[in-house]
Image (tube, coloured by chain):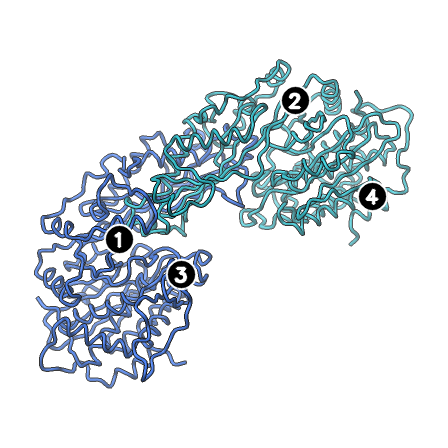
Chain colours: A blue, B cyan
Amino acid sequence: MRNIVVTLLIAFLPYPAFAQKSTPPSPAQLAQEVREYRMDNEDRIIRELSEFLSIPNIASDTPNIQKNAAHLVEMLEARGIETHLLPISGRGPVVFGKLIAPEAKRTVIFYAHYDGQPVDPSAWTDGKPFEPVLRDAAIEAGGKRMLFPENSAQHRAVYNDNWRIYARSASDDKSPIVALLAAIDALRAKKIPLAVNLKLVLEGEEEAGSPNLQRTLLLHENLLGGDLLITGDGPVHQSGRPLVFFGNRGILGFEITTFGPIRALHSGHYGNWAPNPGFELARLLSSMKSDDGRVLIDGFYDDVVPLGNTEKKALEEMPNNDADLEKELQFAKPEGGGKRLVELLQLPSLNIRGLRSAYVGEQAQNIVPEKAEAALDVRLVKGEDPDKKFEQVLAHIRKQGFYVTSAPPTREERLSNPHVVRVVKDVWNYRASRTSMELSVSKALVQLVQDTTGGSAVVAPTLGGSVPMYIFEDLGLPWIGVPIVNYDNHQHSSDENLRLGHFWRGMEIYGAILADLNW
Amino acid sequence: MRNIVVTLLIAFLPYPAFAQKSTPPSPAQLAQEVREYRMDNEDRIIRELSEFLSIPNIASDTPNIQKNAAHLVEMLEARGIETHLLPISGRGPVVFGKLIAPEAKRTVIFYAHYDGQPVDPSAWTDGKPFEPVLRDAAIEAGGKRMLFPENSAQHRAVYNDNWRIYARSASDDKSPIVALLAAIDALRAKKIPLAVNLKLVLEGEEEAGSPNLQRTLLLHENLLGGDLLITGDGPVHQSGRPLVFFGNRGILGFEITTFGPIRALHSGHYGNWAPNPGFELARLLSSMKSDDGRVLIDGFYDDVVPLGNTEKKALEEMPNNDADLEKELQFAKPEGGGKRLVELLQLPSLNIRGLRSAYVGEQAQNIVPEKAEAALDVRLVKGEDPDKKFEQVLAHIRKQGFYVTSAPPTREERLSNPHVVRVVKDVWNYRASRTSMELSVSKALVQLVQDTTGGSAVVAPTLGGSVPMYIFEDLGLPWIGVPIVNYDNHQHSSDENLRLGHFWRGMEIYGAILADLNW
């Protein structure tokens, strides 16, 4: 079977690069044009996405992540986008693309990442995170597996909005890339010119913390001239409405290990004499947060930069569907002492992302384990420094009576300290970033997205997730987030999925931005 | 190659079953006779052990555990021991054996188990728990792999005392069975008659909690007439000295699960709003035990039956090598508020044997996990009831504000209770048991073991581990523990091993008991 990219190459190269129409269409008309194109080409678009999702994309899996980059080059070049690989030793390169619109005065840079979170195939319903599966609804709603249908002369719009594609990165973050490219195809097919020059920065190690992005971009700073950066990463609002957001949280990750005896011991012969690392860890972790979720680490909330009035107003206008979410997620009481979810996202958070000590369940052994481990992450907001935050965490741990080391403790350290803990900071820690909502480009983009979507977009001063947008902030680029995927996409977990209705709407929004953004 | 059991059959059947010598030898002489035999037959004895260890023996692995039983039948019948399998549906049978000594007035029943703890091969240095490996020292001491040597006419005692055999059940609990059979072989070879009738009760699901042992023995109570039960399970004292013990602790195991959102959520978008099950679990666990290891569950120590004076005296006489052990195990401060290890073993204990929530390390994902799990075990002492203890645990958990269920919580339960916990009791829970040290058989056995070992034996009122000796107590049998294996055997963990010097000494002790125990 012919590769979809080659098909695209043949399909689009004959078209003039920037065909012109006389009257520029309105945003709503643009959306309609993109929709018309999509309805005739759904199978082709889904096939391109599906082929892309079939390439395993864990950042540390070098051969495969480089295959993703090579595939992206084909996808971009098929659209006549000038493409350069900005190499990173042993990792996936930054894929850079450039598409010049002769009449354009502004340049928009589109950021997304083509790597995905690590996978545990056994936790996936279909067992194979890199073999995309189509279902007629979400798995939670009883969605059944289906064959991928094909368009025909008689059948357009063969994919239902509620259908979902299951695969790692179906949402985070390959689909925004495919949606953008499909939007370009749609504009070309409808002979609508681009209003802005487009550059693409597609990264291959975002889920590994983007450790090389800043360095790589600085090496190629000459390529990055532009007026606005748009990121396609992240989900839309939980209400299902489109989203425009102006900030991201930073992240600090670390692992804590407590220690028992140097080797696991029989719990009958040594339990309640040999120190238990699980109880040590439980005591330490429970000291960090109050019952209602307030972090008890000294100074934890000190450096938060308060929101401005525009941002506060936007926050107030955001829909409040917390109660519905709680019901859907099946818990009786959120943390945060009564604050709304969107308010809590303006504060730093402390989360246990994993625990491990010996075994539970069928594999449980009657032992005093030799160690217990916890993986944690802190989300940082504007004004907070990851290194300073980590020092606050260490100071708190020391205050609980622990001797702290970053290396495996030596015999000497173990024998001279009753409570020893190893704390190792992740390599990928970075600060938050936020673009002012008062900029003219901010206002223009919000207006355009509202016009494209019938005024349904939610506008958020800051999202909860972390993307290294500080890198672009440091390059002097204002940035704004325009995500497109469904919020219930199981991002970062098993059974990641994309709802097709969201994907189609994303194409329309991206098409309108490319054809009509000006400020 | 000929199976070692067949070799034994050929070697021993021609001998008269109970040859007689004129003057009964002293215990020290008996030990010497067994030693002489052993030095000439080390390769044969090790080969029998090694073949036995090569049969995987997890209680739930029905085909293999039944292979172990069939192999045991061959081993027993090769010695002319009348053997019966007492079947347990879907599990390994109880292997019952009987060897009558014409002159004997007393009957001693020997208990051991042929099943082993579950294994995680990846945690074993040699990766294969059921392929016995010989090393010239413990792995921790840099022990290197060796070939199994063979005896020859010129070379007796080819195995060094410090060498170790690594395999699941090398210590717990296959080697005591092989030591007993080799002791019988030695006495026969030296024409020394048995002083007692011998019965064997060899169980195949002790590590799974002996759920069927009592029922099975009651069905065959007619087989079990006897005057004393000796159990070979457990390690000797940490000082390396032989051990005789009169009690075991009971056990209560349970698993605790706390809950977050119904599905794992992105920790950036939902962290510090969606409840974190890791923090819930940490708070709950840390409420159960004080910093110095005192269990804080109401009534936890109420039902402990105090030791009698003989037991207290024995406890005082037990060697105190706690400080050395702490150094070896590399921790600065034991739990127990200054009490000695042997004192703490007279109290109930609470131990976290495992923790699990999502992932740590390389596999960590930035999520709020949907659940966190802890596996715990309680060791019970004389006077305590497992069911009552479990109720105390549940009452404590409820007191911390948790809604407790034993099933996966329903949507309704989750939505109407801010803190939900699932607590599931293991199927294998039983009470402690203790034989009086004042009985004449108790005194006779201690004296015999002391005479055999130059007075070096440690005498303990209770061991820390759990073996279902209450079953024999209920059958009206006094029971005493005479373990033989090294204490640093990694019992229940990876790299389980047997030090050969201990094994040889065990043969001598068992030989002396068989040839000289009377009261």
Given this view, does label 2 or label 4 mark the residue nearer the observer?
Answer: 2
Given this view, does label 2 or label 3 mark the residue nearer the observer?
Answer: 3
Horizontal placement of B371 versus A234: left or right?
right
**Residue named by callout 1:** A466
Labels 4 and 3 positioned on one and the same chain: no
Q: How many marks?
A: 4
Q: Chain of mark 3?
A: A
Q: Position of residue A432 (x, y in %)?
A: 21, 50
Mark number displayed over residue B153: 4
Q: Which secondary structure lies at badge 2?
A: strand
Task: Identify the image quadrant of the C terminus of chain B.
Answer: top right
| Mark 4 residue crowding within 10 angstroms, few (<14) / some (14–19) / many (20+) | few
Q: Chain of mark 2?
A: B
At horizontal 85% and vertical 27% (from top left) the residue drawn is B104
| Mark 3 residue crowding within 10 angstroms, few (<14) / some (14–19) / many (20+) | few
Q: Amino acid at mark 4?
A: Ala
Q: Eyeballing the image, is A178 above or below B504?
A: below
At horizontal 14% and vertical 58% (from top left) the residue drawn is A476
**Residue named by callout 2:** B459
Q: Which secondary structure lies at badge 4?
A: loop
Q: Position of residue B494 (x, y in %)?
A: 56, 43
Q: CA distance from mark 3 to mark 1?
A: 31 Å
Q: CA distance from mark 2 to mark 4?
A: 40 Å
The reply to whether residue B129 is visible in this rendering is: yes
Horizontal placement of B257 versus A271: left or right?
left
Q: Chain of mark 4?
A: B
* CB within 8 Å, label 3 to label 1: no
Q: Chain of mark 1?
A: A
Q: Amino acid at mark 1?
A: Ser
**Residue named by callout 3:** A142
* CB within 8 Å, label 4 to label 3: no
Q: Amino acid at mark 3?
A: Gly
